[in-house]
Image (cartoon, coloured by chain):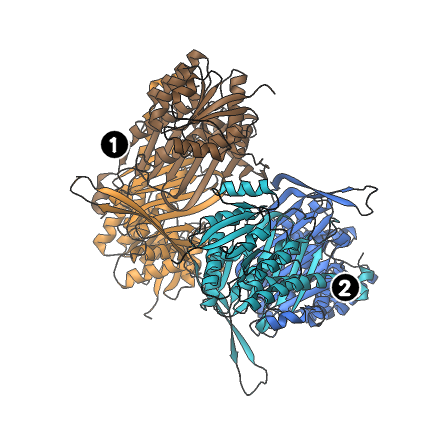
Chain colours: A orange, B brown, C cyan, D blue
Amino acid sequence: MATRLRIAVIGAGYWGPNLARNFRSSADWDLAAIVDLDRVRAQKVADAVGGVPVLTDVEDALADSTIDAVAIATPARTHHPLAMRALAAGKHVVVEKPIADSSDKAREMVDEAQRRGLVLMTDHTYCYTPAVQKIRELVSDGSLGDILFIDSTRINLGLVQPDVDVFWDLAPHDLSIIDFVLPGGLAPRQVAAYGADPIGAGKSCVGYLMMPLQNGGMAHVHVNWMSPTKIRQMVVGGTRRTLVWDDLNPQQRISVYDRGVDLLRQTGFETDRATATVSYRLGDTWSPALSEREALSAMTEEFAGAIREERSARTDGYSGLRVLDVLEAASRSLAASESFTPLRGALAETAV
Amino acid sequence: MATRLRIAVIGAGYWGPNLARNFRSSADWDLAAIVDLDRVRAQKVADAVGGVPVLTDVEDALADSTIDAVAIATPARTHHPLAMRALAAGKHVVVEKPIADSSDKAREMVDEAQRRGLVLMTDHTYCYTPAVQKIRELVSDGSLGDILFIDSTRINLGLVQPDVDVFWDLAPHDLSIIDFVLPGGLAPRQVAAYGADPIGAGKSCVGYLMMPLQNGGMAHVHVNWMSPTKIRQMVVGGTRRTLVWDDLNPQQRISVYDRGVDLLRQTGFETDRATATVSYRLGDTWSPALSEREALSAMTEEFAGAIREERSARTDGYSGLRVLDVLEAASRSLAASESFTPLRGALAETAV
Amino acid sequence: MATRLRIAVIGAGYWGPNLARNFRSSADWDLAAIVDLDRVRAQKVADAVGGVPVLTDVEDALADSTIDAVAIATPARTHHPLAMRALAAGKHVVVEKPIADSSDKAREMVDEAQRRGLVLMTDHTYCYTPAVQKIRELVSDGSLGDILFIDSTRINLGLVQPDVDVFWDLAPHDLSIIDFVLPGGLAPRQVAAYGADPIGAGKSCVGYLMMPLQNGGMAHVHVNWMSPTKIRQMVVGGTRRTLVWDDLNPQQRISVYDRGVDLLRQTGFETDRATATVSYRLGDTWSPALSEREALSAMTEEFAGAIREERSARTDGYSGLRVLDVLEAASRSLAASESFTPLRGALAETAV
Amino acid sequence: MATRLRIAVIGAGYWGPNLARNFRSSADWDLAAIVDLDRVRAQKVADAVGGVPVLTDVEDALADSTIDAVAIATPARTHHPLAMRALAAGKHVVVEKPIADSSDKAREMVDEAQRRGLVLMTDHTYCYTPAVQKIRELVSDGSLGDILFIDSTRINLGLVQPDVDVFWDLAPHDLSIIDFVLPGGLAPRQVAAYGADPIGAGKSCVGYLMMPLQNGGMAHVHVNWMSPTKIRQMVVGGTRRTLVWDDLNPQQRISVYDRGVDLLRQTGFETDRATATVSYRLGDTWSPALSEREALSAMTEEFAGAIREERSARTDGYSGLRVLDVLEAASRSLAASESFTPLRGALAETAV
């Protein structure tokens, strides 16, 4: 293998220690420094991974010409300025999600990286789990056929977040995964979002998000902080097979059903619209064995690969941008009032 | 017990035999006749329940003054004319769902029954299952508190119906159940429906339906003909407890979770908006034993009770009307195009 | 197809109606008569399947030379005399399980059928379910490799039977299935059974049955009338793959796991005992689609096939005999007292 | 609270770090030293919990009069000499399971501790999980009634251990739990064990263990290294209710079923044996909320409590001894050959 790349992890809060541990144990990387304004916090992370230099000023890391890249794990509002500075200093950048706190800023970051020929990657960690890697592979190699619908459920009894609603808290996972597994990425032209705040939290605690897919299909995401049971499930329906990913079933996370509905089109001269005949396949179910690799380890490998091969990372800046664009459209949809259809007047009178 | 009521079952197709069998074995009813234009079909049903008279002309049943009521299990478009004729003849009427093929006609039927002081009941059979009866009881006695959200999933690999889309095929079950268990019945002012037809069937095969509940809550129904796995699940979230009904788990159909999110409002003079503090309850789960009574048997008892006590049936004509009103609004919502929010232009260009 | 075979069903109690219905709807069979001492009961069964002659004397059926076979569904103690009479009259015979009320009588029946060249079949219905047929196929075609262990659980809250203990009530199902799927049939040389009667029912209500298999393997059956949950599960472990049959999971009754333990033997001159190295396979899981055919329909087809092809039925008289032999050995094992190993004296003193 | 007790952890291998971490974070304990012959290994553990003294000679810890107790987490064969030395030095002792490598040695340890008035505790960690604590509580407060049967399953695809068979590897968990929850502890007079070694590993890889309970009940343990699926389940059947503990279902680990079989005894003069009538309860299911406390933390608290209150620990030396006694009896049972009942000769000839 070529010489190792050198990286500084910026931010020693919640996620930074995980990044530090994985870059430290990677064969691709040397962990060059832990950077945090709070030296004590940085030192603690450095000690836990075994003696890595500590810096309190980002500029010191950026000025170090032996450092190839930075991993940013600071609060979302600081992602843009830090990433722009790092890119300006010629560093490759991987940013914890969300890539920025607005799509405008994310777009600037993406443009800047492209202009400078540097890798800008979003750390959509979930995409590097063995399950999601397998889903991408099964979509990509045609095992599922064309994608007809995606239905994702991410619900549990969750903390009502102070700053964000349930869409911004939970849906980034679903959206980044959908972006990762669909051949064309997450590219809806439009979005509809419906939220409920039945406890008066001042923000949606229950949310539903719909996005048309190509060819008449639809993706749907259900996020919920108020469910007493925990569900993490995604169904990916295709023309050939349908896949169910149940992330809480370690004994059978992924099931691929060779079952489905086929529409046999018959055309005859006596009718100018196609007559449809439906047939069913009731075939076998198959559950692929999955590796047990830690997701962040695969992420660090992908980041190194993108840099060395001078290519985009699988979860590049655009993927982070696409997720932000959908979330922002969802917020606009929530604020819009015309999205409901009124019942006709008569019921309002007879009901109640 | 008082003398038995006498009923004629009209229609010997799919549902008629079930009605005949249950009225026949009821202590409240005498099954007076099976009526069908097709005498052979009627005779077969009559034989199966043990020698009941057969008629081919509805008028013969309506003219029989010993007959108190009729049960209509004919195609939906005939419900209105048959029910109006029966009501005009002074008979109480129970109608298979949907109560009519339009809400206008249903409204006429409801008005006619009311004017004549006759019982008009919709056979929302699911509402008479022990599970749904228990849910209604637990909502009604306050065990769940105020209802915050309802999420219903009814998906499987299903026949693409020739005449109706997936909403009209499956959602009547969910809607009639929601109508049955909510204290105020199904009374949304507005509805939003989103459907997908990814196989080109000419109608929605995957559908999502949202309805605001009182106090900021929301009901959501997911119906789907294309799921390789079968799910029949409804979550009813309340301020005190949350109930999960899993109809495919005979060993634990209903689970009541004493878990939830509480919002403790604190007001202080230093702030004019309430500061919310969230607390969690992580209490016990309880699964009530359910009786094993057949739903249709309970339905026939309720019909008799309503007639004898000169009261509305629990699933009266209005309930059938409310379900139709929501379905019609859902169809209008599907036809509307402004319900999606477009993504901003930039993504359309960067995305591929 | 050749002309249909003609059969009389003897016994119109619990199981007879099912046999009558399936022989009636079979393309292989004409249902020639329903025989029962109780004419009313026989007539009811005959009516339900649509006009079949009724007899009250078995001899009338046996004297009818147009009748090829009889199906015996009478109480167990009458199986032997009825079957012996039928065989003497030259009829092929299928007998509801148990084939007789003692292995001695079963052996006589088997010998008599063999001597006369007639088919004697045991109606081990479970063996004709699509799931068990598939298990037999997967064992037989080598998909599982050599069988290492079988573990079968059949527990629920069950009726304490007046005449039989839990072994005789439930284990015949497990034993007949094991007999059906093992290449050599159920052929243990010895058996150990342990039962408990903690409610003083006068018989075992909880039972465990162990039987050595060839090559050091073991079959174990757990039957239990006192379990609050219902389990119907069989694990068949093989050298190549392991199969789990969960009969209460209609969405995935059979799972075949390509996982297992391999023992790699290494021999070296420095050691006279083989050094074992264990390796693991963690492969895919596969769940075959199963047909939805009713078991009894497949049973009637097999009976006809055996008669026409002059061969043994898959569940022939011997299989019924083998099941009886194991149950009788289990009863002897239960009665034996030396099967437990005492703890050493000291504990009895220290323990309370 | 009184002053903290001081403890030395002996052994820095697999389990020692967990003990060190929990004693370190306990309000009851000061972690006085980590002891291991391998100083580097000891230092690593000491560093991980933040600067605890390291010793390489046990005698140094035993000579330190400020140390009240030792926790022994060394290989099983060293438990006896180390514990005897520590007791002789006046230290309270907690020993990792198994308490010793033979019941004779365990008995010596128990006697020695009793003679000296010191606490000897077995670290049966599983007993301190919230689930097992709850089971003990529900047995103890009479919620389950008298215990009728216990059925424990602990199976998965497991490593074939070099030194021990599947009974000694896995059953100590089940046995220590049964010992913990039964009012009288694990006190069978006799045991029967059946093992299979179908892969030629030289030891049982599949095992079944039966023990009579009082009043005609039975406990059964199924341990298995060759199951492709993982099950950790214990059913505790009582006269009032039956409890199912499914340790792999974090959403509902414990279910208490108010279902069961009742035997109503009727005596009449016409019969000298009681006529039994069975009745069924089909009541509710209840799943208690469980705390999330780490088991080892509760264990360290119990150890401190026993020392301070001069009482036996809940999992004292006797409990470790009882588990060993049962395992040794199981090994003797396995070696015995007369525990199977032969089938009668005839089958051996007809079969095959």
| Callout 2 crowding tier (Cα within 10 Å): few <14, some 14–19, many ≥20 | few
Same chain, labels 1 and 2:
no
- Determine if residue A345 is in view: yes
The label on residue B337 is: 1
Give how far across and how far down residue D47 sits, in percent.
56, 61
Q: Which residue is drawn at the image coordinates 51% and 31% (left, top)? A: B22
Chain hosting mark 2 = C
Chain hosting mark 1 = B
Q: Which residue is drawn at the image coordinates 57% and 29% (left, top)? A: B143
When the figure is inspected, residue C272 is found, relative to residue D125, above or below; the finding is below
Please identify the residue farthest to the left as the structure is shown. Answer: A269
Give whichever of A168, A250 is nearer the camera.
A250
- Determine if residue D50 is in view: no
When the figure is inspected, residue B63 is found, relative to residue A191, above or below; the finding is above
| Callout 1 crowding tier (Cα within 10 Å): few <14, some 14–19, many ≥20 | few
Amino acid type, residue under disc 1 in the picture: Ser
Please identify the residue farthest to the bottom as the structure is shown. Answer: C269
Corner quadrant of residue B4:
top right
When the figure is inspected, residue A153 is found, relative to residue B96, above or below; the finding is below
Query: In this rendering, would C55 be left or right of B78?
Result: right
The label on residue C337 is: 2
Q: Are marks 1 and 2 in contact (CB under 8 Å)?
A: no
Give how far across and how far down residue D342 sits, in percent.
68, 69
The label on residue D4 is: none
Q: Which residue is drawn at the image coordinates 55% and 36% (left, top)? A: B256
Give whichever of A59, A249 is nearer the camera.
A249
- Give the structural element (helix, strand or loop) at label 2: loop
Q: Between marks 1 and 2, how big is the CA–CA gap?
A: 80 Å
